[in-house]
Image (cartoon, helix red, strand yellow):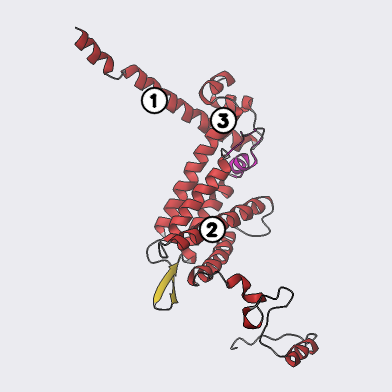
Amino acid sequence: MSTTTRATSAQPDGRDARWAAHRVARRRELVDAALRAIRRHGAGVGMDEIAAEAGTSKTVIYRHLGDRLGLYLAVCESVDALILAEIDAAASATSDGDGDARATGSSARRTPGPAMLGAVIDSYLRLVERDPEVYRFVVRRPDVTLPEGPGDPVTGLSGRIADNLFDLLLAFGPDTEEARGRARAFAWGVVGLVKESADRWLESPGGLSRAQLAAHLAALAHGGLAGALARDAPGPADAHIATAGPGGVDQPDRPADTGRDERSIHDDTARSDETPTFDPAG
């Protein structure tokens, strides 16, 4: 008898599973309603407006999502998943054959091509253009106070995007400790470039379409990455090259030797007022 009772109690309760599924579905419905309310009323939307959009009361929202901070974090989680899915899709769609080879000695390194970078950057800008109020709601954190520590969802999202870009960059180079550190630094640099540019573009487009901005940022990122990933790792003495004097002795107050004699510098100064010319062949 006791054996049968123990076996029965060890089985999962179907009602518990159904209730858990119901809570997940209800939470999803409330987050979707919050997104609709944000689009309708703007980033400063209130809980009353969200409850009206959901066709329920604030009490129900608090029961499933907690306070306004809980709602904010749930919206961020939804936007986070959307952005990462679109970035993954963009990178995968342009990964085959995209990339520029850079010869270094006997080896050939590759860097992500402008088409791939453009697709990844555009996938981020697409959300900004399509859902500007949702984007503002996420990045401006309206009327919420985040707890101390690493719980900032915007920083977390930037980190996950940087992780994706890090994997992408590492795929085009050797898997060494130095290469990994370099790729991670570059990934964060590209994320910062795109995010700050997107924030400014949202408030003041400056005559640029989304496609134009994506193309310009991709060209800038690609040019920098192509040069940086193609060069060999700097040695420990590189920081002193510009200030080292004869015999390798540091001379901090001495300007870097340009290899040009004093007369040529004076000649350049004399010509400084002349109109510069550009020779396409030169």
Residue 203 x, y percent position in the rendering = 68, 50
Residue 214 x, y percent position in the rendering = 56, 59
Please tell me how crowded label 2 is: few (under 14), some (14-19), or many (20+) other residues with Cα within 10 Å.
few
Residue 198 x, y percent position in the rendering = 61, 53
Say which amino acid is labelled 3: Leu
Placement of 276 over or under 206, stated as above or below: below
Residue pushed farthest top?
A: 1
**Residue at 62% across / 43% down in the picture?**
139
| Helix, strand or loop under label 1 | helix
Quadrant placement of the C terminus? bottom right
**Residue at 43% across / 69% down in the picture?**
110
Residue 185: assigned label: 2
- Is residue 169 found left or right of 219 in the rendered image? left
**Residue at 49% across / 66% down in the picture?**
114
| Helix, strand or loop under label 2 | helix
Question: Disc 1 vs disc 3: Cβ atoms closer than 8 Å?
Answer: no
Question: Disc 3 vs disc 2: Cβ atoms closer than 8 Å?
Answer: no
**Residue holding disc 3:** 71
Could you give the CA–CA distance between mark 3 and mark 2, rounded to whole angstroms? 32 Å
**Residue at 65% across / 76% down in the picture?**
242
Quadrant housing residue 257:
bottom right
Please name whichever residue, 110 or 19, is drawn nearer the observer in this view of the structure. Answer: 110
* First-in-chain label (1 vs 3): 1
Please tell me how crowded label 3 is: few (under 14), some (14-19), or many (20+) other residues with Cα within 10 Å.
many
Placement of 276 over or under 164, stated as above or below: below
Residue 21: assigned label: 1
Please name whichever residue, 42 or 255, is drawn nearer the observer in this view of the structure. Answer: 255
Residue 144 x, y percent position in the rendering = 64, 32
Please name whichever residue, 175 or 74, is drawn nearer the observer in this view of the structure. Answer: 175
Magenta segment boundaries in residue numbering: 132-149
